[in-house]
């Protein structure tokens, strides 16, 4: 082959011990390289072309749709390798206990309404658009610990009507989130915080976290009731009628900003005893609805709660990297099995980039995943230049070189 696979990617895949056959391994490596190298549209055809894959396009689609490999095994091997990496980093630091953030959210992969033959599509509510969109919907988790930020796990979500029509068991987004929380394997030297927005703030979710020994930090809708003096009242009403600026604490969180915060401990709706923060950014106004955060770890101070909740932003930036840089939602596959396998390979690619980011970064360099992608692309261009130079020394016809590179004169 004229340009070799990027050796660090090959090393990463081999360490996972996936038990893939050689053809399967080649397809996997081609896909990861193509996802990283391809700019613009990232459908399977473009991914294949970017890596100078000579086999017919159907070979790659069959790898996703029909090839006998187990996506669950790939997921487990990936997550175990990442967890071993995190724990090794923690042991090297020698801290008493490691703080782990497990972030939960959901996202949609939008498709054109004319796309009718792609399996699993339905109308799902889009928070970004404020209305339903023709799309696939996923609930995902993101893991942040020891300086790493990993896209962790995912579950596809189907509406109840779709499940009835296709004779599937319906699971709500909260049910899917709970599945992933329960599946997370933790050790005794970890303190785990589950971070969620108000969509996932339910008693059922909190009970599951408590059963696992996890703490929960979550956004709460301001219409939920608290009981500050033995009388139940909505937080929004309490803030408007009973809170004055003198009741608040001014809190400055590094790299986030200044907040005015009212702290409450006690019952919240059907939840017995939690710490709740009613906060206003920059300036307090009784006419402005506060942003409300609950925390089940009563030992945390105000600054730490606000700083920990801000970690939730990692999953939002993760979605942006997935879609804008890796083409997570740009697939044109018809089979839902193939689509789920494509997502699994996307998670694998994201995790490799994050591992590489940490390895290349140092105390003076704050690398992003975009920086890593650009470096790999530049290295690839360098390989192509060396290849052209070597072929020129061998006096190979320029037409043959261009054909190999899939370029036109």
Image (spheres, rainbow, N blue to C red):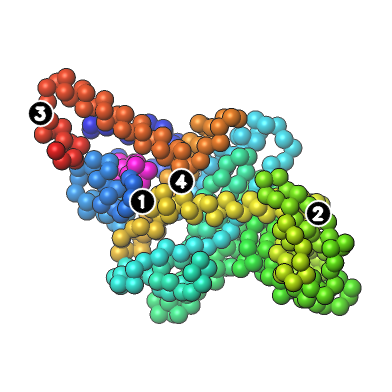
Q: Nearer the viewer, mark 2 or mark 4?
A: 2
At x 16%, y 35%, the residue is 402
Label 1 or label 3, whichever comes before in sequence order: 1
At x 36%, y 66%, the residue is 111
Q: Which residue is mark 4?
A: 350
Q: Which residue is mark 1?
A: 69
Q: Which residue is mark 3?
A: 397
At x 59%, y 53%, the residue is 313
Secondary structure at badge 4 equals: helix
Q: Which residues are magenta?
A: 24-37
> Relative to residue 205, is residue 94 depicted above or below?
above
| Mark 4–mark 1 CB contact (< 8 Å) | no
Label 4 or label 3, whichever comes before in sequence order: 4
Task: Please provide percent x and percent y for residue 271.
Answer: 76, 70
Q: Which residue is mark 2?
A: 250
Task: Please provide percent x and percent y for residue 166.
Answer: 39, 76
């Amino acid at each position: 082959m004229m340009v070799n696979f990027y050796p660090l990617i090959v090393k990463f895949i081999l360490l996972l011990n996936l038990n893939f056959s050689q053809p399967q391994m080649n397809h996997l490596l081609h896909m990861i390289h193509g996802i990283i190298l391809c700019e613009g549209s990232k459908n399977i055809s473009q991914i294949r072309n970017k890596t100078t894959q000579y086999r017919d396009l159907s070979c790659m689609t069959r790898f996703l749709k029909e090839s006998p490999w187990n996506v669950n095994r790939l997921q487990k091997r990936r997550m175990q390798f990442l967890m071993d990496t995190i724990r090794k980093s923690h042991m090297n630091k020698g801290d008493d206990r490691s703080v782990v953030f497990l972030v939960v959210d959901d996202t949609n992969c939008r498709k054109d309404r004319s796309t009718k033959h792609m399996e699993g599509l339905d109308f799902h509510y889009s928070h970004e658009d404020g209305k339903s969109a023709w799309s696939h919907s996923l609930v995902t988790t993101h893991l942040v610990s020891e300086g790493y930020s990993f896209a962790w796990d995912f579950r596809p979500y189907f509406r109840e009507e779709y499940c009835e029509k296709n004779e599937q068991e319906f699971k709500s987004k909260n049910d899917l989130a709970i599945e992933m929380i329960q599946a997370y394997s933790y050790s005794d030297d970890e303190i785990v915080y589950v971070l969620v927005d108000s969509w996932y703030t339910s008693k059922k979710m909190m009970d599951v976290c408590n059963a696992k020994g996890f703490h929960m930090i979550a956004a709460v809708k301001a219409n939920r009731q608290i009981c500050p003096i033995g009388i139940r009242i909505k937080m929004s009403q309490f803030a408007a009628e009973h809170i004055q600026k003198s009741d608040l604490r001014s809190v400055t969180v590094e790299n986030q900003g200044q907040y005015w915060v009212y702290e409450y401990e006690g019952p919240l709706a059907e939840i017995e005893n939690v710490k709740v923060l009613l906060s206003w950014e920059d300036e307090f106004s009784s006419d402005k609805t506060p942003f409300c955060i609950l925390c089940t770890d009563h030992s945390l101070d105000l600054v730490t709660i606000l700083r920990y909740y801000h970690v939730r932003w990692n999953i939002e930036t993760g979605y942006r990297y997935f879609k804008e840089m890796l083409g997570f939602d740009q697939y044109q596959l018809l089979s839902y099995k193939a689509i789920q396998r494509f997502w699994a390979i996307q998670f694998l690619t994201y995790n490799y980039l994050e591992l590489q980011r940490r390895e290349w970064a140092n105390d003076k360099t704050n690398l992003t995943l975009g920086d890593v992608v650009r470096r790999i692309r530049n290295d690839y261009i360098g390989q192509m230049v060396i290849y052209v130079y070597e072929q020129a020394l061998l006096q190979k016809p320029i037409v043959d070189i261009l054909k190999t590179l899939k370029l036109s004169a």
